[in-house]
Image (spheres, helix red, strand yellow):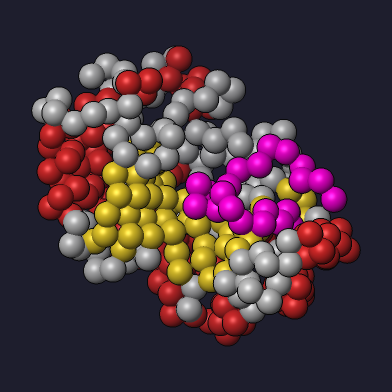
Amino acid sequence: MPIIEPVIRPPAEADSFLLQVTVGCSSNQCTFCAAYHTKPFRLKPQDEILSDIEQRARRYPGTRRVFLLDGDALAMSDAQLVPILEKLQQSFPDLSRVASYANGYNITHRTDEDLRQLAQHGLKLIYVGLESGSQEILDNCQKTATAKEMVIAVERVAKAGIKSSVIVLLGLGGKNDSPRHVQETIVALNAMQPRYLSFLTLMLIPGTLLFRQMQQGAFQPLNTQELLQEARAIIQGLELQKTIFRSDHASNYLPLEGRFPQDKIRLLGILDQALQGKALLRPEMLRGL
């Protein structure tokens, strides 16, 4: 069956088989996000999903990676999800991993045995939108999952054999709450110790509540200099033991990538050069520098 647009997927899943198992997001209320406003949340029928797998297998039997759409695939129960994972394993002999977005509460309500079963059936990576480690900022943004839930979720899936890719949204606290955003995000990330970490930059999207708050003066976005300072401050505070880091999304002003802990000093040096005007920023992204 055709995918119900629009499609939102991580950059790293560009070459994956995009298998839509849910439509939309079960939360769909974050003030900064407009990704699923046109798509009321629902689970796709099991027969449609299995048919999509069969069609893909006929055309691309060598598929190695699968990403489960949409924003909340793990809202499915294990009774619904495990047969899909089994079908993927049966259909693609070279399958190396299945990945999905995941809300914290869709992990924490599962038992450790549930999570191990998902891992054994091929779920190897979840993308978690932490956004901020500050619960106050998350509450202001109406994010359903709590910071504590997301920390626990990442810790628990790691024990089950599932890696996490955690996403932080630079600028989410605006000018007023930037210090809180930095400090509490550092605490959350150091507790999580994610395998992968990505920085994205807040983009104010017309039609969202946060955009209207900006128009009304209730939210003051950071300028480019302040966003770079925020990125530097978070990286300065990180004590990660085995994390691959990227900040190369189209929203970011300065592409960065490296590994923690070995590349921390190098990353800070690049940011220092950018703050001094000695590193190349994406010219189309500059604002208020």
Outermost residue on the bottom side: it is: 113
From which residue to which does the magenta span run? 1-22
- Depth check: 181 or 62 in front? 62
Looking at the image, is 42 positioned above or below residue 111? above
Residue 193, position as x, y percentages in the image: 32, 66
Q: Is residue 71 left or right of residue 217?
A: right
Looking at the image, is 156 positioned above or below residue 258? below
Q: How many tags in the picture? A: 0
Residue 167, position as x, y percentages in the image: 42, 50
For the C terminus, give its image quadrant.
top left
The residue at the point 46 percent across, 25 percent down is 204
Residue 213, position as x, y percentages in the image: 46, 22
Looking at the image, is 80 positioned above or below residue 136? below
- Depth check: 168 or 87 in front? 87
Q: Quadrant of residue 222?
A: top left
- Depth check: 213 or 259 in front? 259
Task: Give the dominant element type of the magenta stretch: helix, strand or loop.
Answer: loop
The residue at the point 27 percent across, 28 percent down is 281
In the rendered image, residue 2 lying in the magenta stretch gets the answer yes
In the rendered image, residue 190 lying in the magenta stretch gets the answer no
